[in-house]
Image (spheres, rainbow, N blue to C red):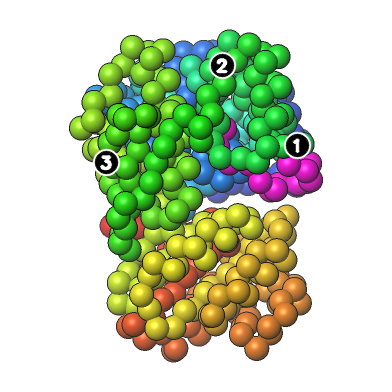
Amino acid sequence: MEKFTKYKDCIEYLFGLERVGIKYDLKNIRTILKFLGNPEKRIKSIHIAGTNGKGSVALIINSVLIEGGFKTGLYTSPHIIDFRERILINGKLIPKNYVIDFTNRLYGLMEKIKPSFFEATTAMAFEYFANQKVDYAVIETGLGGRLDSTNVLKPIISVITGISIDHTEYLGNTIESIAFEKAGIIKSNVPCVIGKMEVRAKSVIIKICKEKNSRLFNAETLMKANIIYRNEDNIEIEAGIKEKKILLKYPIIGNYQVHNIKTALIALKEIGISEKISFSGNILKSGFENSTSNSKIYGRFQKVSNNPKVIIDVSHNVEGIKNIRDNLKYFKFKNLYVIFGMMKDKEYVKCLNELEKLDAIIILTKPGYKRAEEPEVLFKSVKKKDRFLIAENVNAAYKNIKKLLKKEDLLLITGSFFLVSDFLKLKHFSPLT
């Protein structure tokens, strides 16, 4: 008998699988995949890990493959509005009926082994991609790499983007320990592309690549790229190897995107070589230009309104907050207002220190998620208390800001995927329309 007939009830059940004290291993995901007939063995995958930049690199690779005429699966996390944003084929959300059917088929097993939400949804993505016979699946890790649920794959290429301090309770509190966890996605005789990272992280990855006979490609040394034009909606980048260059328009602004673009281009170059694919200049250009519409990845310093300017950004670590400060230099506005909230397990003190460097009024709040830190706790961590306000939730924060906000001002919402999601659910602004 079917347990679920309505999508809403099904999603509530899946979210209810979130466990207190995550058991960080691959036992459950392997059990579920075996039950499903090991669909992960029937997909060609590109596996991407990294503290920052993995979403941007994933969406570029996915979009270029789509523009090249391939059927592609994309698995990312978290989502912003709809759970189904996590699992796409050629930019289309996984059908609600598939989510319901999968959950009903797996219900008995899930009740028995008690998997996490991410373990269940990773298995769902792999089965969906295999059943739909995608040509390639672009798979983003959820947490770390070595023991992440996605790390049952044998990809055609592994990609590791930037590495910085994050998820210290699972990955360790040093750059070296975090790099070791991310490098867990490196497989024997499978090439690995790395992005911009400090020497300590790079040396860990070099060592593991040697041990696994994995050819290492350092995008920072192999590819040159420069921003030659920018406005508030996109950047134009000249990129290439030696004298062979291409001009690419990309709808996610920010100096740091140069590094993500280098990483994606080198990964695409190596995919092209190993898979005997030729990505023409026109395919690359349309892939970059249509990357957000092809991949449904939102909230990377994304402008969702003009009068006043409203920007949503899912940065949730120090490096991401620093990038925000750089990006704001290129925007024209009179007054800056910020709505900020963060999870308890993040380095929110350091992030608040970066935010304090902005000439802004900042409202501290929290999204409706159990790991969210209380705004009163965040407030204790700030020095310039006269520039900070407290609101019990995102709705209250926005009501307070709306009284002050003028057409020539700018409002920034940042600190967490969950915060941005709550803001967009207010239905004042949406990147989905």
Q: Which secondary structure type mostly characterizes the magenta part of the structure?
A: loop
Residue at image x 57%, y 78%?
362
The image quadrant of residue 344 is bottom right
Badge 1 density bin: few <14, some 14–19, many ≥20, Cα 10 Å: many
Hey, which residue is sitting farthest left in the picture? 282
Q: Amino acid at mark 1?
A: Glu
Residue 215 is labelled as 2
Residue 200: percent from left, percent from top: 72, 37
- Secondary structure at numbered mark 1: helix
Name the one closer to the observer, 11 or 432.
432
Residue at image x 38%, y 55%?
253
The image quadrant of residue 31 is top right
Residue 193 on the magenta segment: no
Badge 3 density bin: few <14, some 14–19, many ≥20, Cα 10 Å: some
Q: Which residue is mark 3?
A: 247
Q: CA distance from mark 2 to mark 3?
A: 28 Å
Residue 162: percent from left, percent from top: 58, 41
Residue at image x 60%, y 74%?
357
Q: Amino acid at mark 3?
A: Leu
Q: Which residues are magenta?
A: 160-175
Q: Horizontally, is 329 left or right of 19 in the view?
A: left
Residue at image x 57%, y 61%?
321
Label 1 with label 3: CB-CB less than 8 Å? no
Q: Amino acid at mark 2?
A: Arg
Q: Horizontally, is 284 left or right of 109 in the view?
A: left
Residue 176 is labelled as 1
- Secondary structure at numbered mark 3: strand
- Secondary structure at numbered mark 2: loop
Name the N-terminal-most of marks 2 and 3: 2
Residue 130: percent from left, percent from top: 43, 19
- Residue 366 at least partly seen: no
